[in-house]
Amino acid sequence: MKKISLALVVLLPLLFACQPVNDDTDFKDPAFLQYCGRLTTKSVLPGTKASTSAPVGTITSIELTESGFYAMGTVVDEAGTVTYRTGRYGVEGNVYTLYGVGTLHFNNSASGSVSLIFTPMYGEPQQLPADFLRPKSTNKAFRTWNVEKTRITVKGFTVVSADFNGCNLAEIAEFLRNNGNKAPEDVPNLSVCNISLTGTDTMIVGYNDNSALLNEFSLNGNVLTYTWEERPMGFTFITEEAVITYQDGKCLLSIDGWIENSTTSGSVTFVLSPTD
Amino acid sequence: MHLRPLFLVLAFMALLPFHAGAQHMSLGAGLGTDGVTVELNTSIGRHVHLRAGYGKAFGIINFKVSKISVPLHPGNSDWGSTTVPLRIQPGMNEGHVLLNIHPGKGPFHITVGTYLGNACCLSGELSYLPTDYNIVGIDVDGYLVKAKDGVLQGALYTPGFGKGNFAVKPYLGIGFGHAVRADRRMSFSIDLGAQYLGKPTLWALGEGLTGRSKMVQIPEDALGGLSEKTRQFTRYMVVWPTISAHFYVRLF
């Protein structure tokens, strides 16, 4: 009996020892860290609108993310509207293969003016004077993330939350309507597949139809300041701030938002996992 | 299972033989509104018995409330309402340290002490909820509380002087019988008393964003009409009446 008692006395402090907390997570470096950056063709200025002189079909910029994803901007109408196509890329020396689009050939050793040769999949090579911008900094948030799960909390008629696999805009709009909130009826059956944050301060929201929205951002600690208007969804994120936290090998991106022309506000939290 | 308080009480029980006056010791088993209990007891002088034990409710006792009205959709009262059954059962899982003070030589005693451990007093289960309850819930500090297969489980925590899900509930009562008898191998005792419960709070299992799950406290007004019903139900839950019977065998 005395031995058991002594053993328990010795073990007692262990029972009150701290439990391990895994609120921080280290990720391995992105696979394309030495090849990533932004190419901006010299015919246009950075931004969402091309110069009015740029003809339809002009390539405006190409973002090459740390994780091997690209987002290529192209002028699509006379007004100079630019839309983006996303996909994966591979590199061999100075030759980048943009899968589904073509190849790029340029000197990627440093930031500065480069002579860019773009060869479309079905077409002749084009020479495009461009600026290449290497990432200004590194951060473990700077990579391409898969959207695994989305938690929506709506503060309208009442406060309710729901989890969705991935992020299907039509599914979320239906959830909002069922909870007595206004949400557009004609939301397309689009899903946000991935979100990229790059060292060139670009946030890329990639959809399952290979389209993308590009915005600038800045990161201060774990607060991300950005602009993102989710037009198909009717969402505007009023705070223009997101908070990044890490937990259990995931990145959690939490945003407060509201639906235009309604009293509905809420928050969106993306559960993100690295693509590489 | 809340193991740490249990180990604390077990350690306390194991230390009992060390005290100077430990002439006799008994092992006991009991049944009552504090669950099924096991105890180790020792005498301290001629008038005091020290009892350290552990009790757990095994779901033997439960009762069903047939008509609980809930909205057809958890987030939209425009859809109307429906009634679903609620099953409630005691959920205690805690240790206790008690002193039986015998004012005279007879079996009558006054008992003071405390229960400590998991704060769960009652656990409840709403079943046959509409399918939307499997999707829509409430977010509590990043944990989503919602039904699973139409069943929503919750618990009423009564922390006493404790905090969160750890309860420290003082006990005061009277009883008849001996926990340890020097002259007999076996003894019996009946106790009647009350545990101070503190402010009852509603808890439920929440699912974290990354797959973790834990019990979280539901904010007071998060459940709409159900919150008011819970308040009405818990308003009078200040003490937990504790009636128990114990059977003891003297070890030495």
Image (tube, rainbow, N blue to C red):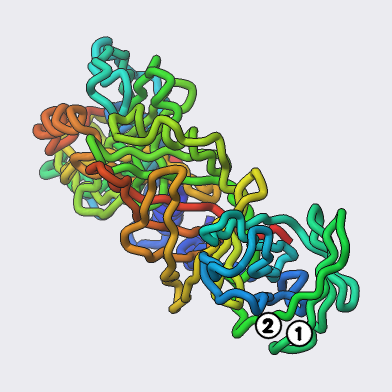
* Residue plotted at (79% across, 82% down): A115
* Residue plotted at (42% across, 64% down): A227
Query: Where is residue A117 shown, x and y percent of the image?
Result: 82, 74
Marks 2/1 in contact by CB < 8 Å: the verdict is yes
- Residue B83 in view of the camera: yes
Label 1 resides on the chain identified as A
Q: What residue is shown with label 1?
A: A114
Q: Amino acid at mark 1?
A: Val
State whether residue A24 is above or below residue B210. below
State whether residue B35 is above or below residue A40. above
Q: Is residue B69 left or right of residue B13?
A: left
Q: Amino acid at mark 2?
A: Asp
Query: Where is residue A202 shown, x and y percent of the image?
Result: 56, 70
How busy is the neighbourhood of tag 2: few (under 14 within 10 Å), some, or many (20 plus)? some
Residue A131's disc number? 2
Q: Secondary structure at mark 2?
A: strand
Q: Nearer the viewer, residue B238 or B189?
A: B238
Say how many tags the image has: 2
Query: Where is residue A50 shown, x and y percent of the image?
Result: 55, 67
How busy is the neighbourhood of tag 1: few (under 14 within 10 Å), some, or many (20 plus)? some
Spatial CA distance of label 2 from label 1 is 6 Å
Q: Secondary structure at mark 1?
A: strand
